[in-house]
Image (cartoon, rainbow, N blue to C red):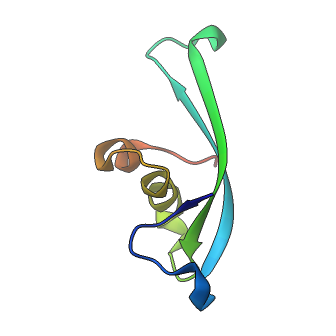
């Protein structure tokens, strides 16, 4: 389980979020997609609009990748 940097899970301020990350290249072919699934701990006061970016940062993705990512709508 990944943990957001600088956060203390022992304080009760964290919640587990199950993430399925799908990476794909420019083509829409299913064969070119990779999936990764893992739980991350995020602060319970994270805004819903920032959840995807926060979770990806906790998983170790770059700031630019996390900022460009989209959640399921």
Query: Is residue 13 visible to the viewer in this orientation of the structure?
Result: no
Depicted 10 relative to depicted 55: above or below: below
Query: In the figure, is residue 66 to the left or right of 3?
Result: left
Identify which residue is drawn at 64% across, 49% down: 73
Identify which residue is drawn at 47% across, 66% down: 4
On-image quarter of the N terminus: bottom right
Q: Name which quarter of the figure residue 17 lies in.
A: bottom right
Farthest residue toward the left? 64
Near-viewer residue (71 or 39): 39
Farthest residue toward the bottom? 11
Q: State the image coordinates of residue 8 (x, y, percent, origin top left).
A: 50, 81
Q: Name which quarter of the figure residue 10 lies in.
A: bottom right
- Count the marks: how many? 0
Query: In the figure, is residue 54 to the left or right of 40?
Result: left
Q: Name which quarter of the figure residue 12 lies in.
A: bottom right
Near-viewer residue (69 or 2): 2
Query: In the figure, is residue 22 to the left or right of 57?
Result: right
Depicted 9 relative to depicted 28: above or below: below
Depicted 13 relative to depicted 71: above or below: below
Q: State the image coordinates of residue 30 (x, y, percent, origin top left).
A: 65, 13
Identify which residue is drawn at 42% across, 48% down: 60
Query: Is residue 70 visible to the viewer in this orientation of the structure?
Result: yes
């Amino acid at each position: 389980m990944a943990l957001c940097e600088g956060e203390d899970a022992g304080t009760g301020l964290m919640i587990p979020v199950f993430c399925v990350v799908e990476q794909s290249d420019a083509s829409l072919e299913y064969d070119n997609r990779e999936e990764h699934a893992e739980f991350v701990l995020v602060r319970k006061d994270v805004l819903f609009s920032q959840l995807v970016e926060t979770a990806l940062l906790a998983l170790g993705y770059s700031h630019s990748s996390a900022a460009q990512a989209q959640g399921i709508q």
